[in-house]
Image (cartoon, grey):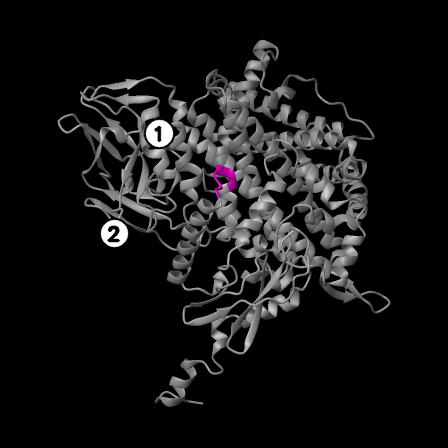
Amino acid sequence: MTAIIRRAIHLKHRIYYYHSDFLLPYSINLNGIKYKTTVENNEPKPHNQISDTKNDHLLTERQSATFNVEELTQFMFGGPGNYFEINTRRQIIRLALDHPIHGTHLPFEYLTADEYYSLTIRKSLLAIQEAKRLNITNNKHRRWFFDIFVNNRFVFFIHTIMSLHSLETMTTEEQKRQFLPLAQSFHITTAYAQTELGHGTDVQRLETEAVFDPTTDSFILNTPTLTSTKFWPGGLGRTVNHVLLMAQLYTPDRNHPCGLQMFLVQIRDLKTHEPLPGVETGVIGVHFAHTFGDNGYLRLKNVRIPRTQMLMKFDQVDEQGKFHNQSDARLLYGTLLHARIYLCESVTVALAQAITIAMRYSAVRFQGQNSNGNEIRILDYPLQQAKLIPCLSATYAFVITFMKLDNYFNELKTNEEIYLEQLPEIHALSSGFKAYTTLISERMAQVCRVACGGHGFLVGSGLVGIRNFLDAGCTAEGDNVVLLQETTRYLLKVMQEVEENNGKHIDSSVAYLSLPLWSSRTTMNLDDYCRVFESRSQLLIKEACNTMLELSSSPSSDEFLNNSIQLVHIANAHMETYLMRAFYEQVNKASQHPSISSILEQLFYVFAIHTLRNESADFIRFKLLSADQIYELETRTLPDMYSQLRPNLVALVDAFDFHDHELDSCLGRYDGQVYEALMERARLNPTNGHKVHPAWLSLKQGTLSIL
């Protein structure tokens, strides 16, 4: 294990301590302020943290745990084939932080917009250089390295997530040889230019045009209307030199569009970075999350590209301008599906970070007093537990379900025929999971922020950025309401097939639709909770089917829209059912680890009962549970679970294995030194560099002085 050092950043007469796994004195002059690193000690520290536990209250919390944290971490995130590959990830974190740039700049919230962009560009390019030097070639490992190195502000993240995937999966072998090495080495960098000013979710109505000219063997690209302006793509504003452009294809052999196709388009000079002729690009308006994303707009006027820069693995245009359609059009949306799965990962990780910060802070914050006059730890207040423990249980449910969904998606990708066969299911699952988790996670991140009181309102708490990121996720990669309707369309279709074919050949995620309804009972085990949610979902879907059939044998789009409120509710119910079953399966896998199994079981009960309570009207209406049963669960079983989980709350967030560098939080520090961190961060505010602000000096010396 490498030694841990403290970096002392000298700001005039004050010292602010940063921490890192790198042992090297280093100094830099940034924005006129000189920073310097120095070595304080070489004592070994926990593998994933910047320092030992220094707060006695946090130490007591860790000592009270009834299970081994590392055992749970390895069970959840380690082992062969696990998505998070925890041991590899730890090595990548060490490598990413093993560079002297860390700790040499002000916190991001103190930078101007230009300073912020300049710093993220510089660190992003440095991260690419370091990953190459360290020979990190695996796409997922590189992404982790970039995220850690640039504090989750890697400016080419769309290039690594969406564009590389498109160039790998939608190009011919010849195109792959030509373009992919350049993209992988970042010699060409790309934005994914699909969304337009006037069209987002309704992809089929995109207006950007690509007209083939056989006389020059090239495409002529235009954004012919104001609403066809590409708007929002990450990296487009000032960063990338190419785009992957989604446009309507027009060829001489057809008098109508050939449909959407993807084109690789250079938009900036590779030497000067100036926009090319016919290209207008810039940054869109200010937004409150993803400020590093460099979201931009693009207008094209008669921009020509070679015919061979249409991605032609599935569809082709030959030299004469004849269009050859050789594919299922659904394959074109594989990149969007890939991006949606990635967003699901980001959402689960963000919520895990939020609950880690709030739980640790609640363990060291004291407020109020008991009858003996002693201050009370806020985590000991039942109301604080009622806020945070449901968030913790939901986080475990989301992480577990994401890993199951990702494994399924990766299995399908290995066989194109099976992939197309199961595409409706994976599309419905990814759409529903993205919509459900972003909505719930945004709400729960807000709960975590408020649970930290006034300090949670500081950007330095780490919670503000997380909440804003999750808020943005509710519309990124598809509006949640639209995605939930996509899930419902699939569910209604499956229910009709179940009733017509007696449940034969039904997808695994909806297999419960062919099962008999659950019968109410006095006591409920884990499987009973799964079954009661399955029955509720089954009844909701069947009810919707009957409603739609009453309208007509073949419901129109208008009829579907008129019932959309009910239909969105159905999709949410299905996702809750899917989450319950995934969580239950994980608890069963833990049976060989008794202490872990009991903890996961308690978390399962909290997640199930809390969700059931919030949706109690359905269970009562369908007579699956009585109001008295739900009241008993809410007032007796749930508080009992809180009491059982109380000794393990800090250990359960420690098991997520976040490095303090990832959290970037004064409140969520592993060592519990929250007040020291808050004061140090406050003193770093550049405004504090003046004993008297220049504005006051100018007023005193001028004619407007009234004091």
Q: Nearer the viewer, residue 335 or 539?
A: 335
**Residue 578 place in picture, x, y as percent:** 63, 29
Q: Which residue is drawn at the image coordinates 51% and 69% (left, top)?
A: 36
> In this figure, which residue is indicated by the disc labeled 1?
176
The segment highlighted magenta reads 135-141
What amino acid is found at the position of numbered circle 2 in the picture? Thr
Left or right placement of residue 372 versus residue 316 in this view: right
Q: Nearer the viewer, residue 163 or 205?
A: 163
**Residue 140 highlighted magenta (yes or no):** yes
Q: Nearer the viewer, residue 112 or 475?
A: 112
| Numbered marks: total | 2
Dot 1 and dot 2 residues touching (CB under 8 Å): no
> In this figure, which residue is indicated by the disc labeled 2?
272
**Residue 575 highlighted magenta (yes or no):** no
What amino acid is found at the position of numbered circle 1 in the picture? Lys
Q: Taking 241 as reference, is 97 above or below it?
A: below
Left or right placement of residue 180 versus residue 549 in this view: left
